[in-house]
Amino acid sequence: MKLSLMDILNESKGKLLYSAVVLDEVSRKQLLSFVKDFVLIPSEWKIINHHMTIGFKKPVPDELKDYIGKNIDLRVKEIGVSDDAIAVKVEGFFTYNEIPHITIAIPKNGKPSNSNLITNWMSIPNDREIIVSGVVTEILS
């Protein structure tokens, strides 16, 4: 089977892993410090604190493609804790997830997707809410 130039280019780009609002370094530091004011993160847990997933193996929706590469502000509204993940609930951009969130930390052998299973969410007082920033991105393998 002969591959076309387009097939070769698409293959070299890799497959879509996920689309996300990827936090900038300042926001990552600010968010981690903020969460530590409310929750004790076990020292053996892995810090993720990287992005809000728009879609796992899903691209940015066509009607939002113009946002790719642009900065987006996300308002941190709640902190969620379980035995399998710590996350913050955010608002400010579309996600396919039922709960828009940023995974902060997971146990050593945990999965970031466990944040989707958190049921214990604590509201953050309005005067303590923070805004974090990131870039709308499609992450390829």
Image (tube, grey):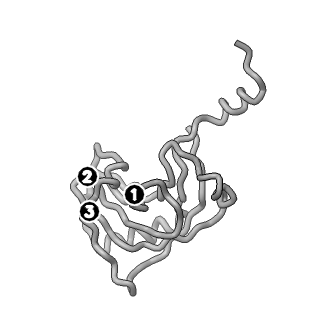
The amino acid on which the numbered mark 2 sits, given as a three-letter code, is Asp
Residue lying at the far bottom in this picture: please name it.
127
Question: Percent from the top left, x then y, of residue 27?
Answer: 50, 68
To which residue does mark 3 refer? 81
Label 3 secondary element: strand
For this rendering, which residue is in front, 24 or 131?
131
Q: Is residue 41 visible?
A: yes
Q: Residue at x 52, y 41 (%)?
A: 17
Q: Residue at x 62, y 66 (%)?
A: 71
The amino acid on which the numbered mark 1 sits, given as a three-letter code, is Glu
Q: Examine the image and state in which quarter residue 63 appears.
A: bottom right
Residue lying at the far right in this picture: please name it.
5
Q: Examine the image and state in which quarter residue 87 appears.
A: bottom left
Quadrant in which the N terminus appears: top right
- Label 1 or label 3, whichever lies nearer to me, is 1
The image shows residue 121, relative to residue 118, as above or below, that is below
The amino acid on which the numbered mark 3 sits, given as a three-letter code, is Val
Quadrant in which the C terminus appears: top right
To which residue does mark 1 refer? 98
Q: Residue at x 42, y 60 (%)?
A: 102
Q: Marks 1 and 2, how far apart in space?
A: 18 Å
